[in-house]
Structure formats: C-alpha cells, structure tokens
Image (spheres, grey):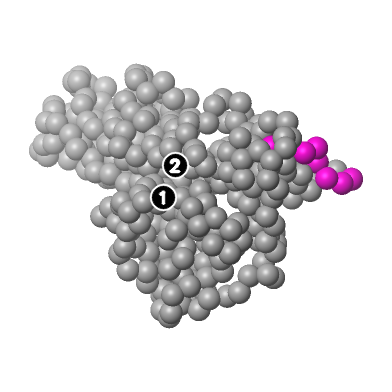
Amino acid sequence: MRTGWAAALLLVAACGGAPKADQTGTGTGTGTGTGSEGPEPGSDEQIAGVEKAMNDLAPAAHQCWAAAAVDDYQLAGSVKLLVDITEDGKATANVQEDTTKDDVLKKCLRIVAEGYRWAPPTRGTAVLLPFQFSAPSGQNLIDRDLVPRHAKGARVLLDARNSGNPAASVFELETPKTDGLLAPTASERAEIWIDLSSYEATYLPPKAPRTPEGEKRFLIVSVPGGREDATRRAGVLPASPAQKGKGAVIVPLSKTKPIERAGVGTVRLLVDPAATTGAADAPLSATLLDATAGAAIPEHVHDGATEILYVVSGGGTMIVDGVSLEVTASSVVQVPAGVKHSFTASAATRALQFYTPAGPEQRFKQK
C-alpha cells in the first residue's frame, strides 16, 4: 500500500480516519503542496487518483487565492472541502471548515472541485480536500481580470491593501455617456490619467481641477497610495470638489517622440517631469513601452523609486526579487524601491510604465 498525504484524503465508507494535508498558496499564484502521514483507506488506485487530483487542482487553488487576494494580500487560513463523487464522476463540494472567512475563495474552490474530471478509482467515494493558504509578505502581480467591475465605473487595481506597497494606488475608470464634460472634481493627490484609447496623458498636481469627457476608459495612478477605503473599492473615484490650484498638463501621444532602445524596442515619455511639468523632483512619471518579441531587459534596481507596469498587450516573464512571474495582457505589476527585477518578452508587448517618485525614466534619454 502507498503511504503519504494522498492516502489521508480518501474517505471510503468502510474506513474512518482524520485526514490532514496542506496546499500552500502564495502571492504570485504559485506554491507547493505538503502534507503529513495518515491512514491508508482504499486501494492503491484510489489513493493514486486522489494524489493526482491534488496535484492537478493545486494551480487552480492558487488562482482562487489570487482572485480573493485582489482585495487583501494578507488572506490566509484553511478551507476543507468534502467532495462527494458519484459513480458517473459528477461531484458536489461542500465547505466543512473555513478559517479564511473569504466567500470568494470558498466559492472558487467549490467550483474547481466540482468541475474537475475525477478519475474512475475515486468515483463512488467521498474525498476530503484540506487547503492551507499562507499570506506572503507582499504581492507584486495582480490580474486585473480578477478585479470585479462596479456599476459606478471605477475599480481599484492596486493599493497597499492588495500589494503591501503604499507608494501608489492604481485605478481604472469608465466614465458614463454624457453630452459633454463631466462635472469638475479634484484630487488631494498628484495623479496621472491615461486615456486607454488614445494614450493621451494628463498630469494633475494636487488640487488641480479635472474634467474628463464622458464614455471613455481611463487608467489613473495616484501618489501617494495607501489602503483605499470601502467607498473607493465600491467603485467611487477618489475625488473632492474642484479647488483652486495649478492646472493640468495634457500630453497627446502625437506630441511625444519615439526613443529606440537596442534589444528592447520603443519608449515614449508621456509624462516627463524634466520637460513636461518643469519639476525634476515630480512625484510621478509615465512612459509607453513597446517591446519587441524576445526583448530582454536585464536585472536592475531602482533604489529610490517604485515601478508600476500596466500591461496592455503581449506578455512574458518578469523576475522580481528572484521570483518568476508570468506576465500577461491583463497584468498589473508593482516593484518596490530597491528590489531587483528583469523582464523577457515572449511576444510583442505594450505596457504603460510609471515611476514614483520620478527619475528612472530619464535613463531612456541616454544613448
């Protein structure tokens, strides 16, 4: 008979036991399964079927953690599912124990377990799947496809609550259809707005009035960041009544010049503090990166600045502090100051790139 954690997961009607096993989640959506010795109910074939199921389900379980952690990267705890499998392979999963108190995670795990193709040896049995999730020290990668959309139009993609980094907050905003401009508002923070259809960039210093057009989709980066409150997470854009202050600086894409970088591709400085805002110590900058397929940006570090990437298309592999991250067309990445990172494009990739405070973008001007 086979020993190990897989044997402890199978509950056959004629056998008892107290199953114990761990499936550890991390902030990058990857992890390893560990477990303890346990009783050996069932046949070798049944045990092998459960073992295969746990291995197969591990990536999906980590995706469930990632979907739940878009609100809070400190999500941790255990969920135990009892999965009843019929003779024809259909499954019904119910939560037996939960210490995470996260409805998104529990629902996702149930869907994953019920949708799995259970092998014939496990059919006609009940399987207990205990998942243990541990919180990482921070989260570098967010899949924005996992961030729910709200009727009010705005959603928080990145903040201190889901990344651990208070340097900046990132929002998407879909403005409603109107006959003209929306009512002017102002933010207490410095902001960059990017029109995601035209890539026109707008830099707003604190208290500058903003009057966006209706029926558009914007990417907004605000500094400093922090833990955005429940109102913002419910889809309400952070704003205050328009105030007197310095005006916005608007930069159409047509006013920027492409900078060719050998082995990388093309970079455009959308918000260049040295040229656009007139302040070399500006809190924020923005660039548009078009990397060629196979482009490799070697490992480097920004000692005093956080970097944020909003990937528009393409993707590749990013290594952040020694951890390999799969970057896709729905990724938002944050790299805190002082952390080593590199990127290799597996396809032609377009990304919006931000630094806070500004400064690292100046290297693109160097030949």
The 10 Å Cα crowd at callout 2, few under 14, some 14 to 19, many 20 or more, is many
Mark 1 secondary-structure assignment: strand
Q: Nearer the viewer, residue 156 or 83?
A: 156
- Image quarter where the N terminus lies is top left
Q: Which mark is residue 306?
A: 1
Q: Which residue is disc 2 drawn over?
A: 167
- Residue 159: percent from left, percent from top: 48, 38
Q: Tell whether label 1 touches label 2 (CB within 8 Å).
A: yes
Q: Is residue 6 visible?
A: yes
Q: Nearer the viewer, residue 63 or 86?
A: 63
User: In the image, is residue 317 above or below residue 21?
Assistant: below
- Residue 276: percent from left, percent from top: 61, 61
Q: Which mark is residue 129?
A: none
- Residue 356: percent from left, percent from top: 46, 50
Q: Residue at x 31, y 51 (%)?
A: 338
Q: Residue at x 75, y 46 (%)?
A: 212
Q: Which residues are magenta?
A: 179-186
Q: Is 347 on the left or on the right of 84, as rendered? A: right
Q: Determine which quarter of the picture holds residue 273.
A: bottom right
- The mark tally for this picture is 2
- The amino acid at mark 1 is Thr
Q: Residue at x 13, y 28 (%)?
A: 38
Q: Determine which quarter of the picture holds residue 324.
A: bottom left
Q: Residue furthest right?
A: 179
